[in-house]
């Protein structure tokens, strides 16, 4: 309740100063409350958190991507002074499907997260699913679309975080043609998935009490790896750990499946001994390794290294990776040759997120600054 009161006090202060309307006042209060909860390590998928969860670090950079990136734009315009309240559109997690549509998540103010779609030659998108649909997935209130993924060639994968007395993610397939949902799995809260043709088998990105880890999912059940991996001379369990064992694991994220069933992921071996992080900017200072793994060997193959946090996507033919780096100063889109590790810059000096490739692998869509979709062609 202390966090909620902080949001109310700050809202009243700014609303009186800038003569906001009731709608602006309510939108800011909601988003600022969520922001405070994130920074103070609260779980975003429930309104009230048990005291033993307060100390669990839910890092704001990752949580912003997973939930409400609009908060930053609402909080600050300019150098700490809110001049004019503009309620920007936030978009994230585009998925380019075989029907030619790019599906993505969209949010304006506190209206809730919606699923939209847009074709490359269109100037604007169209809404296909709203908050009433996410509530139907969770069978109750407190539901939020969290991220999208390609479940099959024809079906869109949708992750919905439920806060209806539980803390879980419902993974579903949505058929645009039939306008119907079908369940894949019900899991602990996730940050991303890499599935094999919608069979609820693959890998997931999951927040833990120490940071973020990658775990296997088999038959819809999230499990643990039985053996550790070794990258850059350091050995740890990719499944992560919970306090007080944080010093024994490294941060790992962004699983992406290759056509042959292997998984690519991003990890920072030099984060071992530093978790949990207290400064989210420390993620940008780590050396990140892009790895390829068959899910069994002791030492994943290191494809290349990066500076900055990135999202990964694998080309349909498995020849190259698309890497979207969002770290200020080194952001952009790169192609990485999987065989040689050579990097070719495609987009420079932009904060980029969540790349997705066209079905033929010749074009990409990504999110710039969590504000708008960008389309581009790839060099042959």
Image: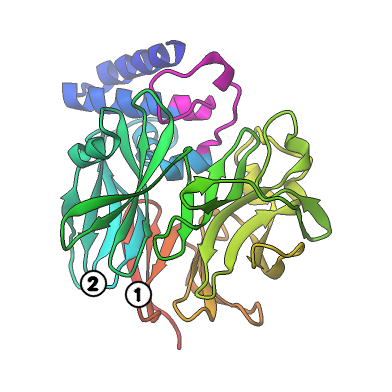
Mark seen at residue 358: 1
Seen from this angle, which residue lies furthest bottom? 380
Q: Where is residue 220 in the image (x, y as percent from the top left)?
A: 46, 49
Q: Looking at the image, is mark 2 or mark 1 earlier in the sequence?
A: 2
Question: Does residue 43 lie above or below 192 as drawn?
Answer: above
In the displayed structure image, the side of residue 358 where residue 235 appears, left or right:
right
Q: Quadrant of residue 96?
A: bottom left
Question: Does residue 71 lie above or below 218 as drawn?
Answer: above
Question: Does residue 349 lie above or below 206 as drawn?
Answer: below
Question: Pointer 2: what residue?
Answer: 99
Q: Which of 144 and 196 is in front in this view?
A: 196
User: Which quadrant: the C terminus?
Assistant: bottom left
Q: Nearer the viewer, mark 2 or mark 1?
A: 2
Q: Which residue is drawn at 47% across and 19% down?
A: 49
Query: Magenta region: which residues?
Result: 36-60
Residue 46 part of the magenta segment? yes
Residue 301 part of the magenta segment? no
Q: Position of residue 276 (x, y in %)?
A: 68, 35
Seen from this angle, which residue lies furthest front? 219
Instruction: Let me know if residue 21 appears in the view.
Output: no
Q: Which of 299 and 139 is in front in this view?
A: 139
In the displayed structure image, the side of residue 373 where residue 361 appears, left or right:
right
Q: Residue at x 18, y 68 (%)?
A: 122
Task: Report the magenta stretch's main SS.
Answer: loop
Q: Residue at x 76, y 62 (%)?
A: 298
- Give the distance between the C-alpha atoms of the residues marked 2 and 1, in whole angstroms: 10 Å
In the displayed structure image, the side of residue 309 where residue 374 appears, left or right:
left
User: Which quadrant: the N terminus?
Assistant: top left
Q: In which quarter of the image is residue 290?
A: bottom right
Circle 1 — which element? loop
Mark seen at residue 94: none
| Label 2: few (<14), some (14–19) or many (≥20) C-alpha neighbours in 10 Å | few
């Amino acid at each position: 309740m202390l966090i909620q009161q902080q949001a109310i006090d700050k809202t009243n202060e700014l609303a009186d100063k800038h003569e906001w309307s009731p709608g602006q006042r309510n939108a800011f209060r909601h988003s600022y409350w969520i922001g405070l909860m994130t920074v103070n390590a609260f779980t975003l998928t429930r309104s009230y958190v048990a005291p033993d969860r307060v100390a669990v670090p839910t890092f704001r950079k990752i949580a912003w991507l997973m939930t409400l990136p609009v908060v930053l734009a609402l909080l600050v315009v300019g150098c700490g002074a809110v001049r004019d309240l503009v309620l920007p559109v936030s978009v994230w997690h585009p998925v380019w499907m075989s029907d030619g549509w790019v599906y993505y998540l969209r949010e304006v103010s506190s209206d809730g997260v919606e699923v939209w779609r847009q074709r490359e030659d269109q100037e604007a998108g169209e809404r296909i699913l709203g908050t009433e649909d996410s509530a139907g997935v969770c069978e109750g209130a407190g539901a939020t679309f969290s991220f999208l993924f390609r479940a099959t060639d024809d079906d869109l994968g949708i992750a919905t975080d439920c806060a209806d007395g539980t803390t879980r993610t419902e993974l579903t397939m949505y058929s645009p043609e039939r306008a119907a949902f079908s369940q894949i799995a019900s899991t602990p809260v996730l940050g991303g998935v890499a599935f094999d043709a919608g069979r609820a088998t693959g890998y997931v990105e999951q927040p833990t009490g120490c940071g973020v880890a990658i775990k296997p999912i088999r038959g819809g059940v999230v499990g643990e790896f039985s053996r550790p991996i070794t990258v850059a001379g350091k050995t740890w369990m990719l499944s992560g750990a919970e306090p007080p064992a944080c010093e024994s694991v490294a941060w790992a994220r962004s699983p992406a499946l290759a056509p042959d069933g292997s998984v690519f992921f991003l990890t920072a071996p030099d984060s071992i001994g530093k978790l949990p992080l207290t400064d989210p900017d420390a993620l940008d200072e780590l050396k990140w390794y892009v790895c390829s793994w068959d899910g069994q060997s002791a030492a994943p193959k290191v494809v290349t290294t990066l500076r900055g946090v990135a999202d990964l996507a694998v080309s349909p033919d498995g020849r190259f990776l698309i890497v979207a780096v969002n770290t200020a100063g080194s952001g952009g889109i790169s192609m990485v040759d999987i065989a040689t590790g050579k990097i070719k810059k495609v987009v420079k000096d932009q904060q980029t997120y969540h790349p997705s490739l066209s079905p033929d692998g010749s074009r990409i869509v990504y999110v710039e600054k969590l504000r708008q979709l960008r389309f581009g062609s790839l060099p042959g």
